[in-house]
Image (cartoon, rainbow, N blue to C red):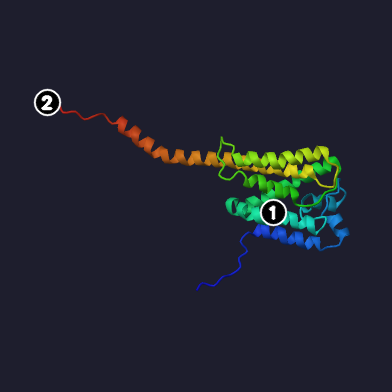
Amino acid sequence: MARLRVSYNSPVVLTLTLMSVVVCLLPTSIVQEWFTTHGQLDGLAGYVTLLTHVLGHANWQHLFGNITLILLVGPILEERHGSLPLLAMIIVTALVASLVDLALGRHTLGASGVVFMMILLASTANIRRGEIPLTFIACALIYLGGEGCAAVTKTDNVSHLGHLLGGLTGAGFAFLGAHLTGRGREARAAEKAEPKLAEKKARLAVPPVTDEDP
């Protein structure tokens, strides 16, 4: 009987989750200083929180709501796209949200933008250049439409704009990946077809042999 072992199967997702849990255990003053956007670049912490705000959460309920979805969707995306590309997408999503907060002078924390990025990115499974998956349209209407309305109509402490930006970033990653994949597929097809085309041209260049009477 084969022995079962626990594997660290999704390094980026699991590390993000563990770091978020550790940050949630820290005193509130530290979370506000180093894991919440300041709304301005006031010293080292103002720059650091442009990225680290995705690790901070207001409370355990906020944390569990985010990491549940990250642990469900994240490993699938990490297996499909790779650890480094997923890490890059998380960093870009964090920067986009924090730069908008900086422009608006807002203070936010949490990985909700990353969650929405992952949801929209996952909804574009098997996307191809020139196509828009119906699953993406459904998710966009449900998540982005709902957050867009909430951003306009609600005055709560939830960063609906951050959710919206995260979803749009995920959609952008999906279509950019589809475009690059399509170009790569076309290039590989062209490389395969090139020897056959050269062989065909060579055959056409050889004059036909005919039988003539001496």
Res 88 label: none
Look at the image and tell me whether residue 88 can be seen: yes
Task: Identify the residue at horizontal 56%, vertical 37% (top origin).
Answer: 129
Q: Position of residue 146 (x, y in %)?
A: 74, 40
Q: Quick one: SS at disc 2?
A: loop
Toward which corner of the image does residue 147 lie, by quadrant?
A: top right
Toward which corner of the image does residue 201 lie, by quadrant?
A: top left
Above or below, 211 against 102 in this view is: above
Residue 82 horizontal side relative to residue 213, left or right: right
Toward which corner of the image does residue 125 lie, by quadrant?
A: top right
- As rendered, which of 129 and 160 lies closer to the eye? 160
- Amino acid identity at mark 1: Leu
Residue ID for mark 2 = 213
Task: Identify the residue at horizontal 61%, vertical 61% (top origin).
Answer: 9
Res 69 label: 1
Look at the image and tell me whether residue 176 can be seen: no
Furthest residue to the left? 214
Q: Position of residue 172 (x, y in %)?
A: 66, 40
- Amino acid identity at mark 2: Asp
Task: Identify the residue at horizontal 82%, vertical 38% (top origin).
Answer: 153
Task: Identify the residue at horizontal 80%, vertical 40% (top origin).
Answer: 151
